[in-house]
Image: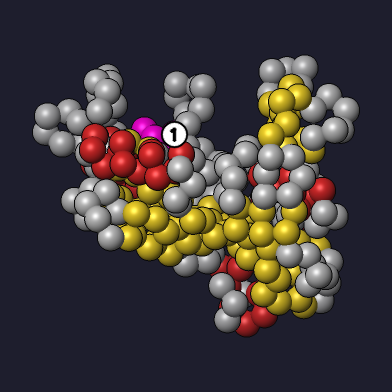
């Protein structure tokens, strides 16, 4: 792993990150990241998942490394590599699209007929430097690339759909922009929908599967948060 300046964590920070560790072996750490925790930011004083990984640093100063990211507002499963060989192997698996990810989303409306969205996704550069995603061909959308997300509606109740989302490409905000483009913006999405209709972005990374660095397959599941468990009796998450 790259040499990095050691980050010292408080006992409270160490306890916090360990509280959402759900599985660990010699190569991989799997976490159920809470909503609101960014993976990385440009602000040096922010608490981030990347910094919290210093809680698992070895005595030689090496520590786990992120191999993928979730949006700050998204909760759920995220993994980190404990060794350089594991990091390289997992990074290759992501690049080769050997990693399967499943998300849960709550959206307004009846989405039973929606099974996939394959609209290309590009970047919109806003005036203050922020970048968001847009659908290829729309105004101000640059560098659009192919994107595919598959959907399966698990339940519909009182005008709300619980959707299983499986992105087959890895574009920025892919699930969020594809659902919004299809007419089903995720509850609580302040960028692509009405951010005031929920207390948080109702998107949860539920499951991740792929080749384990030492052989075989890994398969980690992050239990759905209470907001999802309460939907249709909690039996669909």
The image shows residue 150 at horizontal and vertical percentages of 66, 59
The image shows residue 193 at horizontal and vertical percentages of 80, 47
Q: Residue at x 60, y 52 (%)?
A: 167
The image shows residue 11 at horizontal and vertical percentages of 26, 42
Instruction: Provide the residue designation for mark 1.
Output: 47
Q: Is residue 216 above or below residue 157?
A: above
Q: Looking at this view, is 129 or 81 the one in front?
A: 81
In the picture provided, is 5 more to the left or to the right than 190? left
Work out which residue is located at the far left of the displayed protein and give it. 59
In the picture provided, is 3 more to the left or to the right than 136? left
The image shows residue 41 at horizontal and vertical percentages of 51, 27
Question: What type of secondary structure mainly makes up the magenta span?
Answer: helix
Q: Residue at x 28, y 60 (%)?
A: 216
- Find numbered disc 1 in the image and state the secondary structure of the residue it sits on: loop
The answer to whether one can see residue 12 in this image is no
Whether residue 134 appears in magenta in the rendering, the answer is no
Q: Residue at x 75, y 69 (%)?
A: 161
Quadrant of the rendering where the N terminus is positioned:
top left
Q: How many marks?
A: 1
Q: Dot 1: within a 10 Å radius of its alpha carbon, few (fewer than 14), some, or many (20 or more) residues? A: some
Q: Residue at x 20, y 31 (%)?
A: 62
The answer to whether one can see residue 136 in this image is yes
Q: What's the magenta region?
A: 47-51
Coloring scheme of the render? secondary structure
Quadrant in the rendering for residue 44 = top left
């Amino acid at each position: 792993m790259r040499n990095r300046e050691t980050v010292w964590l408080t006992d409270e920070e160490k306890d916090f990150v360990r509280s959402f560790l759900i599985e660990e072996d010699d190569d991989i750490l799997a976490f159920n990241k809470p909503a609101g925790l960014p993976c990385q930011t440009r602000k040096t004083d922010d608490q981030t998942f990347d910094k919290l990984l210093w809680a698992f640093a070895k005595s030689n100063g090496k520590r786990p490394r992120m191999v993928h990211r979730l949006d700050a507002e998204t909760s759920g499963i995220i993994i980190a590599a404990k060794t350089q060989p594991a990091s390289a192997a997992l990074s290759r698996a992501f690049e080769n699209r050997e990693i399967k990810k499943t998300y849960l989303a709550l959206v307004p409306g009846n989405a039973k007929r929606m099974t996939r969205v394959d609209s290309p996704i590009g970047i919109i550069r806003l005036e203050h430097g922020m970048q968001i995603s847009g659908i290829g061909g729309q105004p101000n959308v640059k560098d659009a690339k192919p994107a595919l997300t598959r959907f399966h509606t698990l339940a519909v109740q009182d005008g709300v759909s619980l959707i299983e989302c499986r992105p087959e490409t890895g574009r920025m905000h892919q699930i969020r922009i594809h659902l919004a483009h299809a007419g089903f913006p995720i509850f609580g999405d302040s960028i692509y929908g009405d951010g005031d209709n929920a207390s948080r972005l109702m998107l949860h990374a539920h499951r991740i599967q792929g080749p384990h660095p030492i052989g075989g397959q890994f398969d980690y599941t992050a239990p759905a948060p209470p907001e999802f468990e309460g939907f249709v009796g909690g039996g669909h998450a």
